Image: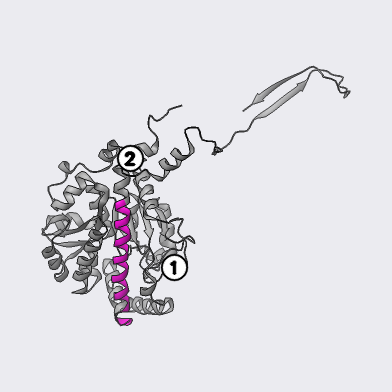
Amino acid sequence: MLRLTKSLPSLVNSNAFVRRTYADLSKLSPLVDIDPCVHEALRGSPGSVVALESTIITHGMPYPHNLETALEVEQIVRQKGAIPATIAIVDGRIKVGTTADQLARLAQSDTIKTSRRDLAYVLGKGLSGGTTVAGTLLVADMVGIRVFATGGIGGVHRGGEDSLDVSADLVELGRTPVAVVSSGVKSILDIPRTLEYLETQGVCVASYGSPERDFPAFYTRRSGSKAVYNFDSAAEAANAISVNGALGLRSGFLIGVPIPAEHALDQALMDGAIAEALAEATRQNIGGKEVTPFILAAVSKITAGKSLQSNMALIKNNASVAAEIAVELSRIESGQVKSVSERESASSGICSQRVPVVIGGSIVDTCISVLDDDLKVMSRTSPHCGKLQF
């Protein structure tokens, strides 16, 4: 039997693991600019960096709410002890960590909503763009960031079984080992079908702080769907992310954090507003990547701005949770604390008395042939031969 020379938790905590997992920054594309503070963190404590998307700034909120929210979110991450890295495209260059001036410019100018398919075009033309969840995931993985905070991810659109309108966010999550902390899937989408699609992509979907595993629905705390798992704490989530990296898995996590109760909206109100906005989008022939920004703006108008306030509140809360996870991840991978698995192993001693779990099974047939032609059952032994078949 092949045996590892180190236990899995030891691999997670080793410097060798950190070197293997995180990107070699010296080999990055010359089209990528990393902010000095972010660069220093990635070299010394990569787990402490939290990626932030820029589509929220460019397409998700009106000015000046978008700029104010972006600056506040970065400050929240810093206050929790992590390093924020807002990812965006500015003048044909990928920015990992943006300045206040760059954020202000993105918040007030027309830019391109940039996913994986758009990157080469936007960079090649020297344009500016706000990175979607998919675009941000791609860049985060490129530089070695493992935690990413956003409001809500894209998904399968309502009627997607006919239109095949499925967000690239879902595919990117299936091939990028980054944990996305969000308030679930935008409630304008088909949440049950989105969760099914994520399962197919191999994405680990977990609720956060919900023993009932309630999966949130962006503006509301419950969607009616269940996550597969639940993380009770930032430490639990960080441990899973570390193990994911140690195993070399190339799929990510979706961690669903419910919107704070005081900012949650009434489900019936939101259902009515979304239905009205969807009908208006159909009337105006809105399609493709313009659908989500249009509907979010329409819903904000219908709800007299309540949905915008909720959107701002939930992204701030998600950034706080993501920062806590990033700090725990950094502590685990720097060896400051033991992973959950290692703590359990140490407390149980070298020789564990736990019952092993056997996966699979075997069938053994015992065949016995009696050699006596005249068999008599008289409590005696008869000549026989036997064999085992596996």
Is 179 magenta? The answer is no
Question: What residue sits 24% from the left and 60% below the top?
Answer: 79
Quick check: 150 above or below 373? below
Asked if residue 327 shows in the view, the reply is yes
Quick check: 17 above or below 292? above
Question: What residue sits 23% from the left and 48% below the top?
Answer: 142
- Element under disc 2: helix
Q: Which residue is mark 2?
A: 13
Name the magenta segment's main secondary structure.
helix
Mark 1, other Cα within 10 Å: few <14 / some 14–19 / many ≥20: some
Q: Is residue 234 left or right of residue 213?
A: left
Q: Is residue 157 left or right of residue 85?
A: right
Viewer-side residue, 111 vs 73: 73
Q: Is residue 305 left or right of residue 224?
A: left
Q: Which residue is mark 1?
A: 223
Q: Quadrant of the C terminus?
A: top right
Viewer-side residue, 144 vs 278: 144
Is 303 magenta? The answer is yes
Indicate how the structure is coloured in the image: one colour
Quick check: 305 above or below 216? below
The image quadrant of residue 385 is top right
The image quadrant of residue 371 is top right
Asked if residue 201 shows in the view, the reply is no
Question: What residue sits 74% from the left and 24% below the top?
Answer: 368
Check disc 2 and give the amino acid type. Answer: Asn
**Residue 321, position as x, y percentages in the image:** 33, 60
For marks 2 and 1, the one nearer the N-term is 2
